[in-house]
Amino acid sequence: MRGIQGRTWRLYAISGGLLAVVVAGAVVWFSAGRAEQRADNLDQLGRACAGLLPREQLEGFVPGDSAGVLEEYGTMLEPGRESRALLDCSLAWGAGVWEPEALVQVRAEALIATQVAEADAGSRSIGDFPLPLPAGARGGTGADDRVKGSEVSASLQVECPGGLRGRSQASTRFQVEVELPSTADSDYDVSDTERLLAARTAVGVANWVIEHQNCGREPIRTDASPRPAEGPAPTKLCAWLDPDELGFAEEEWEFSGDGTYNPRAGFCGGRIAGYGAPTGTPVVAVRAESWSGEFARGAYERHAYVGTAPGRRASSSAITSSDSPPTLALWAESVCDGGPSYHRVAVTPELDFGGKKEVVVEDHVRKQFSTDARAALDRYLAAPDGWPTRSHCHDTTILGEVEEWRR
């Protein structure tokens, strides 16, 4: 009996040893497999999107347990191709519940005339690009939440005087869009370093297009020093917007606006930061826009269509509470370098509805709204570095006010 037990023990020992060897071999094989998969993914990252992705900074998102999914379209199209895509690429890792665990997207697209008009005449906040840009280029950065984590983005528009080849329609401007994964848990925590990375990637893509298209402009510098962190000061083109000088709300303000001069259109904006409500009825937000030539005609037609052009609405001292803050817009017309031009300066006063659905503005308060709007317009028109002066505007005529509030 003792001999049988001894033989049984030896069999268990041998089986256990074999199992340990198998398990150890499986672990080594699995580790080797992960290492090989990650190496393949890193190689794919280096080659993807014409080799323009920041490999070193994205390595932390590259897994070893699944292959990356790369989709690329067209890179640089040949003459006669109708797509506007100059580069269209996405690289995803990991199968999440609703979306990949990490995603990189890059697109460079030639803009046709209607898109250029929309970009120039529409609302845009382009003063936050962390790199200094030359004339003929403007951009911005952003951040967004994902199902898990967040992403950082950068956009850049670049003019090509020599035009873009291979387009079905003539085009002298292209746009770059870049989206990169972020290490932040939410969009509010995306760092300035990650925004700078997205911006540099967008500039790298733009320079790739400039080189391949030979479109008549110098590459944009990527080694330039980042702009200082944004504070209470507006851009040079919008330096006229000084709340203290204008007597507006004595709060901290945040600004947006053009970082480079565009002869077709200009934009400056400012509003108080945070959610505090100052006492009285001071101006808490300002927006100034100018359009020239065809862009002026299009902008005026859009405002006329929705009833916010001068002379289209009757005056009212009763203002109804709504999601949109009450705004008084003052319009003017000039002759500028680009032809007939419109200027629109809008001020938003702080109104206390006190829980009521409607407030009636007294005459002296309403007159102050007009005074504030005219002061902002006068300062805008006279600013040495402002859009009207840069565009050599003259023969300016005041067209009238528009009360943009619910009655």
Image (cartoon, rainbow, N blue to C red):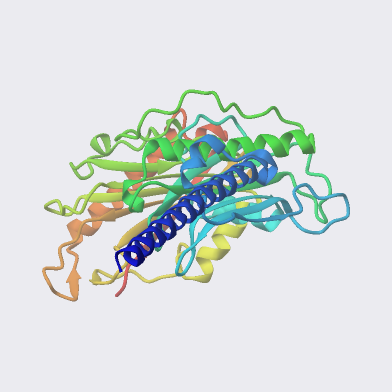
Q: Which residue: 48% across, 70% down?
A: 306
Q: Which residue: 49% across, 43% down?
A: 140
Q: Position of residue 304 (x, y in %)?
A: 52, 67
Look at the picture and state if 202 lies above or below 310. Answer: above
**Which of the pair 122/343 is nearer the observer?**
122
Q: Which residue: 35% across, 35% down?
A: 230
**Which of the pair 4/254 is nearer the observer?**
4
**Which of the pair 218/62 is nearer the observer?**
62
Assign the N terminus to one quadrant of the image.
bottom left
Q: Position of residue 190 (x, y in %)?
A: 36, 45
Q: Position of residue 347 (x, y in %)?
A: 32, 52
Q: Is residue 270 visible?
A: no
Look at the picture and state if 54 lies above or below 91. Answer: above
Tell me how many marks there are.
Answer: 0
**Which of the pair 34/390 is nearer the observer?**
34
Q: Which residue: 25% across, 50% down?
A: 284
Assign the C terminus to one quadrant of the image.
bottom left
Look at the picture and state if 179 lies above or below 354. Answer: above
Residue 100 lies left or right of residue 347; in this view the side is right
Q: Is residue 376 visible?
A: yes
Residue 8 lies left or right of residue 276; in this view the side is right
Q: Position of residue 350 (x, y in %)?
A: 21, 56
